[in-house]
Image (cartoon, coloured by chain):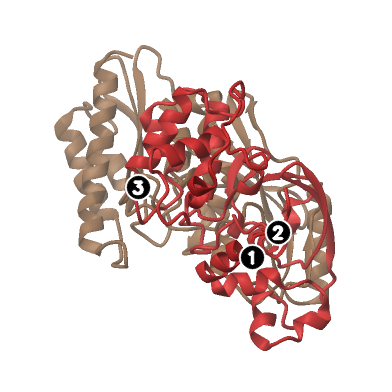
Chain colours: A red, B brown
Amino acid sequence: MPRRPTNRAGGAKNAAESGRAARGAVMPRRPTNRAGGAKNAAESGRASHGTVSDLVIRLRVNGEARRWTVAPGDLLLDVLRREGYWGVKRGCETGECGACAVLLDGEPVNSCLMFAVQAGDRDILTVEGVARGEHLDPIQEAFLDHGGVQCGYCTPAMVLCTKALLERSPHPTEAEVREALGGVLCRCTGYKKPVEAVLAAAASGGGSAAGARAPRRRAAGRRAGR
Amino acid sequence: MFDQLRAFHRPTSVAAALRLVQSERRAGGRGAFVAGGTDLVVQRDRSLRWLVDVSRLPLRYVRQRGRGWAIGATSRLADLEHSAAVQRLADGILAEAAGTAGSRQIRNMGTAGGNLANASPASDLAPPLLVLDASVVIAGRGARRTVPLERFFRGVNRTVLDGGLLVEILIPPPPAPKGGAAAWSFQKLGRLESDIAVVNAAVGVAVDAGGRCTWARVALGAVAPTPLRARGAEALLVGKPFDRPAADAAAARAAEEARPVTDVRSTAAYRREMSRVLVARALAECLEKIGRGR
């Protein structure tokens, strides 16, 4: 799994979705680049970097060991996007919308509310780690099959929250599904179809814990929802 | 976002955390403790220069302590929600309240100690903990001190912590009257249950074998600068037969004790009326539980 989207068009789309974030996200952490404009300095969160001692954290992201240098005040959302995990979406940045959710040691958290330092020695799963190469996870398949994706901005978080749900409760009730997705706001589909998708994923043994079913390979055209 | 932060400490013992705070204070500059970040990050306080992360301290536990309970300050809201012990304690009002304190992601991050130390008037844990006569243990300069929760809050976002660290919540054994019964209820009004409360309330009632109320607690949140005990309502209940008229009179009294404000979530008048409604519902639930002969 490449850390950055190899498809530049995909990158451009992400940039369009969240211009403010994406600019910061592609900025390497070399100080020379921070001088690249006041706006970028503000985005990367370190206008006056001189007195701040950077911290080194080791963590696992999508199963791969990472060693990152972060500033004390860096939020996990910003660092993940800077490192190319653009499936972690910048939404409200106040913990309300859930678009930035990732799984921390298997449990969903909002990365906008967590300092990057606090992810040290932890295990993070982003949506980039859910599919295996071109093979979508059954949960992702279900979201496509049931029209659970419209603009797609909330989809990574919904997929991750679903994954955590099905790990702990492989056969959830609809109420449990709604509770599990309750911290991810969608402004397109109104939740009905995502809920149907999760119930369908559960019915097909879609939790990766169940894992028995080999994911189907999708025709390229169907992957647009990602 | 927090580019002004110059230090982020991650101690693994309470003593080390307190030492770090002391040395940072000597060096000057404002700082704070942080755990789940669900309040601190949202508040975006740009005057903060340092943080001491308490999430690695060994304070994530729910333990029996004598006949009561001790809850470590960094227990996540989700820990309380799912703890079998907390679910059994006092009809599960504390577990229920923890389960409404924000979305699942928030409950996986936010801690019990943070929910109190932030001193939001709308804290969801405060009303049930007030009803349970909880105290908090504060570590700071010198000996640890134990403060009844009712005296812990000083105003909106203000407490008696004075730079100390809330390390533990103590809950004494709830009343279990011989031959009588006790019941508890938690109620919350928000747009959705997981939203911040417009009003929240918890009650506890004990009755003797004759159905006379021997003990009562009524607590309200989001209707005053701090979560409050409605002592007038409690006094109306104790010593009288616990029935619907008594419950309704107590609910009306609780609404008079509320000191609500108008803000983006509600008007003061609506909050006062909903205080009455929630306390009435809570007491009605207790009445029903006791009537079922538990």
Mark 2, residue position: A4
Q: Nearer the viewer, residue B98 or A107?
A: A107
The chain that hosts pointer 3 is: B
Tag of residue B148: none
Q: In which quarter of the image is the N terminus of chain B?
A: bottom right
Front disc: 2 or 1: 1
Give me the C-alpha separation between circle 2 and circle 1: 9 Å
* B241 vs A129: above or below: above
> Which image quarter: residue A51?
bottom right
Q: Residue at x 26, y 43 (%)?
A: B278
Mark 1, residue position: A8
Q: Do the residues labelled 3 and 2 touch (CB within 8 Å)?
A: no
- Callout 1: helix, strand or loop? helix
Type of amino acid at the residue the image marks with label 3:
Asn
Q: Nearer the viewer, residue B46 or B230?
A: B46
Tag of residue B200: 3
* Relative side of B139 to B195, left or right: right
- Callout 3: helix, strand or loop? strand
Type of amino acid at the residue the image marks with label 1:
Arg
- Same chain check for tags 1 and 3: no
Q: Which residue is drawn at 37% across and 35% down?
A: A196
Q: Which residue is drawn at 47% across and 53% down?
A: A154
Type of amino acid at the residue the image marks with label 2:
Arg
Q: Can residue B80 be seen in this view?
A: no
Q: Residue at x 59, y 59 (%)?
A: A112
- Same chain check for tags 3 and 2: no
The chain that hosts pointer 1 is: A
